[in-house]
Image (cartoon, helix red, strand yellow):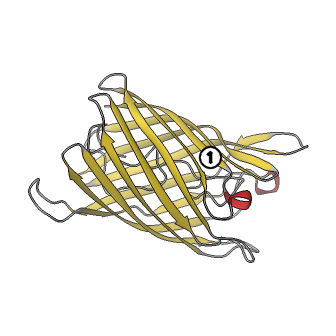
Amino acid sequence: MKHVAGDIRVPAAALIFLAASFSASQAGPPFITDDPEPVELGHWEVYGFGAGTQVKGDIGGTLVGTEVNYGAAPNLQLHVIVPLAFDHPDGGPTVAGIGDIELGAKYRFITPGEDDWYPQVGIFPLVELPAGNAARGLGAGKMREYLPVWLQKDWGDWTSYGGGGYWFNQGAGNRNYWFAGWELQNQVTKQLMLGGEIFHQTADMIGGKATTSFNAGGVYDFSENYHLLFSGGRGLQNPALTNQFSYYLALQWTS
C-alpha cells in the first residue's frame, strides 16, 4: 500500500498512519499525514481497512488490508501493512491480489512535558516490498523507501501534526519525490474526533504531475478497545490525473 494519492494503482490511505489510544492526542489514520507518537510500550494497534482513489478512467487501492503496530520499546513502534490490492479500469475487468507489503519503525526522539512549548518530533522510515503484481496494477514492481520527519503539538481538545519526507521511487519511468502534509483535529465529544488535512506530493513519474489534496474524517470510539476510522477527500491540483476522490474506512482494535 502507498501513502500518497498520486498513484492510481496503489493509492494513498493509511495509514498509517499510530497512537496508543484514541483520545485528544490520537494521530495518523484515518489521515495520510502521519505523526511522531508511537504506540505505548507493550501495546498493540490492529486495523482492518479498505481504501481507494479514483482518477479519470480508473479506480484502485486496497480492497481489504491489515495494519499492525506494536510498542516494542519506549518511544519505538514497529509497523507492518499487508494489503489485498485491487484495480478497476473503466471498461475493463477488476483485478485483485496481494499488494506491496509495508514495513516500518517509528521512533520519537523529542518528547516534551505537558507544559513545554515545543512539539513532539519523530521519524518513521518505511520500506515497501514489491509483493504485488505490477503488470496487473497491484504494486510498484520495485522496492521503495520513505524517510519522513513528523511533528505534533497538543493543547486542550486540539491536536495538530505534520511534516513530510522523501520517497525513493525506483523503476523505469519513475522519479523520486517529496511528500508533505499537515492536519488539525478536535475531540468534539468523548467518543468522537473530527479533523482535516491538506497534503502535497511532487511528481512521481517522468512527465507526471504534482498533486495537492485534502481529506476530512474522524474517529468514533465504540469502546476503549474498538474504534471506527473514516475519511474522504479529493485533489485540488490536477485531480483528474491524481485524485478525483479518495476514501479510507477501518475498524481498529487497541490494547
Q: Quadrant of residue 5?
A: bottom right
Location of residue 203 (image quadrant): bottom right
Q: Nearer the viewer, residue 131 or 221?
A: 221
Residue 214 higher or lower than 149, as above or below: above
Residue 64 shown left or right of residue 171 in the figure: left
* Pick the front one: 194 or 33: 194
Query: Is 206 situated left or right of 210 in this image?
Result: right
Helix, strand or loop at label 1? It is: strand
* Residue 88 vertical placement versus 168 (above, below): above
Q: Residue furthest right?
A: 91
Is residue 55 or residue 3 the one in the foreground?
55
User: Quadrant where the C terminus lies?
Assistant: top left
Q: Residue at label 1?
A: 246
Question: Is 228 located above or below residue 179 in the figure?
Answer: above
- The three-letter code of the residue at mark 1 reads Ser
In percent of width and height, residue 167 lies at 55, 70
Residue 31, image x, y percentages? 46, 48
Q: Is residue 14 left or right of residue 110?
A: right
Q: Is residue 94 left or right of residue 199?
A: right
Q: Residues within 10 Å of mark 1 (few under 14, many from 20)?
A: many
When the figure is inspected, residue 114 is found, relative to residue 189, above or below; the finding is below
Count of marks overlaid on the render: 1
**Residue 236 screen position, x and y as percent:** 60, 60
Among the 4 quarters of the image, the one containing residue 228: top left
Q: Residue at x 38, y 61 (%)?
A: 162
Could you tell me which residue is drawn at 36 percent across and 56 percent down? 35
Foreground residue, 236 or 251?
A: 236
Seen as rendered, the residue at the extreme left is: 115
